[in-house]
Amino acid sequence: MFRYRRSATAAVGALGVVAAVVLGVAAPASAHVSVNPKEATQGGYGRFAFRVPNESDAASTTKVEVVLPENAPVGSVSTMPVPGWTVAVEKRKVDPPLQVHGSEITEAVSKVTWTATGDAGVKPGQFQEFPVSMGPLPQVETMVFKTLQTYSDGNVVRWIEEPVAGAEEPAHPAPVLTLTAAAPSAGSAAPVAAEADDDDDDSDGGTGTVLGAVGLVAGLAGLVLGGLAFARTRREPVARS
């Protein structure tokens, strides 16, 4: 029994070490710069926030630069005021122009830069969100936003590595927005399906009614015959020996 308890204790201790290692490895991943929400629909509009945590123990984050992907331009990008921060928006020419609600747009936002004023920087142990509104979202599967995070001590962290499916997460991954295709509208397909369903219902309903009537008649006939047979047996005299 003592040996069993000692083995169990050792096993629990080993599991604790493994859990600590796993949690220790996973913890830094949660501190990466990210875009929230992480998924949206192609062709739609949405409000997104770039979440920037401070990973320094002594310096504050004073500037955040988010670069929009060149291969997935967006027709409309607007920012929301962040107290204590100024914002600068840079644009670039797009060729061919973007078609947005019947109008051609020849310029698209290429980079958004937020800069802290006074003592508004993101301090150690804190994070800050920088909201934007974007749309219509392009017809691509992912949008990768390469981001630069500048600290008050001059250090710059470059969140620019693109994740690769099936590979380990890079040390400094860029925020990634996954885009899914819009669901087909219930335009022309739904009525056809409804009509087919109605036809099936009418056909099945008629057949079911006929079969039900036949079954009812057969059942009533059985009851009548059974009743007659029972009455006949009651009237017939019992033969005496």
Image (tube, rainbow, N blue to C red):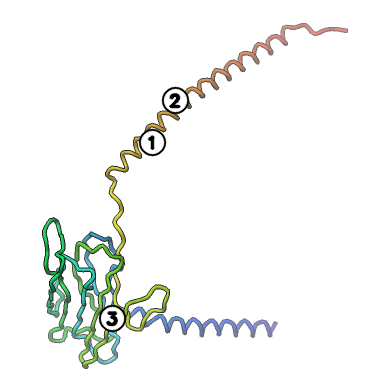
Q: Give the side of residue 30 with respect to residue 132, left or right.
A: right
Label 1 element class = helix
Amino acid, disc 3: Ile
Label 3 element class = loop
Amino acid, disc 2: Gly
Q: Identify the mark at residue 144; answer none if there is no mark.
A: none
Real-space Cα separation, disc 1 to disc 3, in angstroms: 53 Å
Q: Where is residue 24? Give x, y as percent.
A: 42, 84
Q: Which of marks 1 and 3 is nearer the N terminus?
A: 3
- Outermost residue on the right side: it is 241
* Residue on which the image places disc 3: 160
Q: Where is residue 108? Give x, y as percent.
A: 14, 69
CB within 8 Å, label 2 to label 1:
no
Q: Give the side of residue 167 with respect to residue 159, left or right.
A: right
* Residue on which the image places disc 2: 206
Using the rendered view, name the quadrant where residue 80 is placed: bottom left
Using the rendered view, name the quadrant where residue 59 is placed: bottom left
* Residue on which the image places disc 1: 197
Which residue is nearer to you in this view: 159 or 213?
159
Mark 1 neighbour class, 10 Å CA radius: few under 14, some 14 to 19, many 20 or more: few
Residue 10 lies, with reference to residue 197, above or below; the image says below
Q: Where is residue 32? Give x, y as percent.
A: 31, 80
Real-space Cα separation, disc 2 to disc 1, in angstroms: 14 Å
CB within 8 Å, label 1 to label 3:
no
Mark 2 neighbour class, 10 Å CA radius: few under 14, some 14 to 19, many 20 or more: few
Label 2 element class = helix
Q: Which of marks 3 and 2 is nearer the N terminus?
A: 3
Which residue is nearer to you in this view: 186 or 119?
186
Amino acid, disc 1: Asp
Look at 24% across and 80% down and name the residue there: 147
Q: Which of marks 2 and 1 is nearer the N terminus?
A: 1
